[in-house]
């Protein structure tokens, strides 16, 4: 839902980042307002996951230029945990398995960290169990998964549902979902998309990173961005996703080559 | 590499200067262990105190034992308080407090299935398993011989199942604990043993257990110490065929903790499970020297040793497995996994497999890792602070061993205690 008077939640300006000595993000610009759903598409290796990890504060990535403002504050100077507590959520492309840490306890500690930030009281184990059982319904997940170690031995689809469960508990302001659709069968996709739709509202925003149109059949984006070689090459409405589906990404490469030949915003090499 | 071991005053002479004065404080040999005391004191006068010159003690500095000269008494109140603060015994469990002075069975009615050994049986059994597992002359064992004045000697009668809780807290000086356990055919014994040292002090533990055919022993040891406390423990088992034994030992907070599980499968065909978790921080040393020997075919060993090393802590693991020619079709697996939390901590781990039989399965492995960046980041990305995330991961690492402790012993083992920087101080 686009409302031009809605407050800006996330403002990414000319963001550049590298990992080790390799420049990956080469000037990303993106403005996200409350109530909006953005899709970010692009070939493998175009920098989508890097963008999401930089936003979440992964220590492997170094920001070399540009800015990210979250509700008016400089997001980049905050620790990852602080970003999460104030409402930035990253749904991982590859959720991490943590043997020996109980999923239930993990979810409770995380939920309480976010609640504390919002000035809400911490939930004890009983109150939390009530909450988690209710939120499990959003992703139609079996409570048995709460008793297991975090993501350990979960199938691809189960891991993704666990991500959406975390999102349902943390109630983020900006949710960045990195290929939450990959590895899902049709039923799981429907459940995950249903969860995202339920959680999307006028006061929050969603950034969906995806390869495929099929997720966008279930979740209608307000904007579609095409990423290539570390920046956003083109922005359009949901019809852009359909165009990509029909024409593939070759035209993106051509457009990128033309752009680079023209010397316009040539990727900045760092190192 | 061993510069830290030649600190001033730790020459061999200086190292053992405490011994004579300490021996002089011991009461004259008497009581049920009189002969053992005489033997131990003689041995200590003849054997040098172990030093880094001996391969088995290369990394393990015993200078903490110098404080043994100290008259006992000072820390006893704290020790008594820490033992008294324990939750009550688990339902169906029988608790004994071992204080190293009084006869633990004085005025006690033993539960069904548990009997005190008589002097004749003690005479026959005491030292048997130590000799069979080749450690009767080890220095820490002789130290126990020299000092122990009381003994807990019990039999679990055939087909009975017993749960025992043994609690000891060290004050200043040395607390010597000597145990002899005899499990008859098909007897089952679960022992939850808690050793506490809330302040400076030392504990010497020597346990012998004989498992008859089809007997089952589950021994869970939780030892929570202090940076100025030392623990020396020998846990010696003889297993007859079809018996099974699980020794799970968790230690944290000790200036020095050296544990030596020694197992002999007398005719093979038994199952041995060894689990160890040692946590070191500050300048603490944790050392496990295990020794398992199969004197017959088809024996099984499943061993996992874990270490968490922070600060300038140091850990040593030496896992000897002996598979002679007669031990065909032995199946042994040994894994040591260390979590290194500081680049100033040191870990030395060495499997020592001696396999002569040709038809055996023996696997061993050793890993040393630090906290995984991706695991930390995942937790942090959910709002969990870096320190708490590290603690969760550390606890998860320990969990694999902790979950093998009997339930009661787990309750004694608050994970916070494992993570506390300064033991129980
Ligand atoms: N941690 C890393 N170390 C080295 N290279 C990386 C790392 N993360 C990403 N890259 C590289 O950055 C580029 C962009 O990767 P990524 O952001 O994962 O793309 P996408 O998610 O669009 O497929 C790729 O060439 C990838 O190999
Ligand atoms: Mg990706």
Image: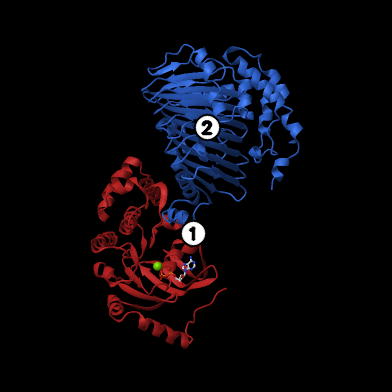
Q: CA distance from mark 1 to mark 2?
A: 41 Å
The answer to whether residue B242 is visible is yes
Q: Percent from the top left, x then y, of residue A223?
A: 32, 73
In-image side of B214 versus B370 (left or right) = left
Apparent side of residue B34 relative to residue A252 in the rendered image (left or right):
right
Determine the chain carrying the residue at label 2: B
On the rendered structure, is B70 left or right of B342?
A: right
Q: Quadrant of residue B68?
A: top right
Quadrant for ligand 1?
Answer: bottom left
For label 1, the SS is loop
Q: Color of chain B here?
A: blue
Residue B85 visible in the current orientation: no
| Pointer 1 and pointer 2 on the same chain | no
Tell me where residue B80 appears, x and y as whole percent.
Answer: 54, 22
Vertical relation: B395 (above or below) B100:
below
Mark sitting on residue A78: 1
Q: Secondary structure at mark 2?
A: strand
Residue drawn at x 53%, y 18% is B124
Q: Which chain is red?
A: A
Closer to the camera in the image, B134 or A104: B134
The quarter of the picture where the C terminus of chain B appears is top right
Q: Residues within 10 Å of mark 1 (few under 14, many from 20)?
A: few
The foreground one among B167 and B80 is B167
Q: Position of residue B296 (x, y in %)?
A: 47, 35
The dot on residue B223 is 2
Residue A25, placed above or below residue B192:
below
């Amino acid at each position: 839902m686009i409302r031009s008077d809605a407050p800006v939640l996330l403002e990414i300006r000319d963001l550049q980042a590298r990992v080790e000595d390799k420049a990956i993000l080469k000037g990303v610009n993106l403005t996200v307002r409350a109530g909006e759903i953005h899709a970010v598409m692009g070939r493998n290796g175009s920098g989508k996951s890097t963008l999401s990890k930089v936003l979440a504060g992964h220590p492997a990535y170094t920001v070399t230029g540009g800015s990210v403002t979250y509700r008016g504050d400089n997001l980049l100077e905050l620790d990852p945990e602080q970003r999460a507590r104030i409402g930035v959520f990253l749904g991982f492309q590859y959720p991490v398995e943590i043997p020996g840490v109980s999923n239930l306890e993990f979810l409770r500690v995380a939920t309480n960290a976010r609640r504390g930030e919002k000035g809400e009281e911490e939930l004890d184990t009983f109150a939390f169990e009530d909450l988690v059982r209710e939120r499990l319904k959003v992703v139609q997940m079996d409570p048995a998964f709460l008793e297991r170690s975090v993501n350990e031995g979960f199938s691809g689809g189960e891991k993704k549902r666990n991500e959406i469960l975390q999102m349902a508990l943390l109630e983020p302001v900006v949710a960045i979902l990195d290929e939450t659709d990959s590895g899902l069968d049709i039923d799981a996709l429907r459940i995950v998309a249903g969860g995202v739709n339920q959680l999307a509202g006028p006061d929050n925003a969603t950034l969906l990173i995806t390869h495929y149109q099929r997720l966008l059949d279930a979740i209608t984006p307000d904007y579609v961005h095409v990423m290539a070689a570390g920046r956003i090459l083109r922005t359009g409405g949901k019809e852009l996703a359909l165009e990509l589906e029909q024409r593939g990404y070759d035209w993106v490469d051509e457009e990128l080559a033309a752009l680079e030949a023209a010397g316009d915003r040539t990727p900045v090499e760092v190192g | 590499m061993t510069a830290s071991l030649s600190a001033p005053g730790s020459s061999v002479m200086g190292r053992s200067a405490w011994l004579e004065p300490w021996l002089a404080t011991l009461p004259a040999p008497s009581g049920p262990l009189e002969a053992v005391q005489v033997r131990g004191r003689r041995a200590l006068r003849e054997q040098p105190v172990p030093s880094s010159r001996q391969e088995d003690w290369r990394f393990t500095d015993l200078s903490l034992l110098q404080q043994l000269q100290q008259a006992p008494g000072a820390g006893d109140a704290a020790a008594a308080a820490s033992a008294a603060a324990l939750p009550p015994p688990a339902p169906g469990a029988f608790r004994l407090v071992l204080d190293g002075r009084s006869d633990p069975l004085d005025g006690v009615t033993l539960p069904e299935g548990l009997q005190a050994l008589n002097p004749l049986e003690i005479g026959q059994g005491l030292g048997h398993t130590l000799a069979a597992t080749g450690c009767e002359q080890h220095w820490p064992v002789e130290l126990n011989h020299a000092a122990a004045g009381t003994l807990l000697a019990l039999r679990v009668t055939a087909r009975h199942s017993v749960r025992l809780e043994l609690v000891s807290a060290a004050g200043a000086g040395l607390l010597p604990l000597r145990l002899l356990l005899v499990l008859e055919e098909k007897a089952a014994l679960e022992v939850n043993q808690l050793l506490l040292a809330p302040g400076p002090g030392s504990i010497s533990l020597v346990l012998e257990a004989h498992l008859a055919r089809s007997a089952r022993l589950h021994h869970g040891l939780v030892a929570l110490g202090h940076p100025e406390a030392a623990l020396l423990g020998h846990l010696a088992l003889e297993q007859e065929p079809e018996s099974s034994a699980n020794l799970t030992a968790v230690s944290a907070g000790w200036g020095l903790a050296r544990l030596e599980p020694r197992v002999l499968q007398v005719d093979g065909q038994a199952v041995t499970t060894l689990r160890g978790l040692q946590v070191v921080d500050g300048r603490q040393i944790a050392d496990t020297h295990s020794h398992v020997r199969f004197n017959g075919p088809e024996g099984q060993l499943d061993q996992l040793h874990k270490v968490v090393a922070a600060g300038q802590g140091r850990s040593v693991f030496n896992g000897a497995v002996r598979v002679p020619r007669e031990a065909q079709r032995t199946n042994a697996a040994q894994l040591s996994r260390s979590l290194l939390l500081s680049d100033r901590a040191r870990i030395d781990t060495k499997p020592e497999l001696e396999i002569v039989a040709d038809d055996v399965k023996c696997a061993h492995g050793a890993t040393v890792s630090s906290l995984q960046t991706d695991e930390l980041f995942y937790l942090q990305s959910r709002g969990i602070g870096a320190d708490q995330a590290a603690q969760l991961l550390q606890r998860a690492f320990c969990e694999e061993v902790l979950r093998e402790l009997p339930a009661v012993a787990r309750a004694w083992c608050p994970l916070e205690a494992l993570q506390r920087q300064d033991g129980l101080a």
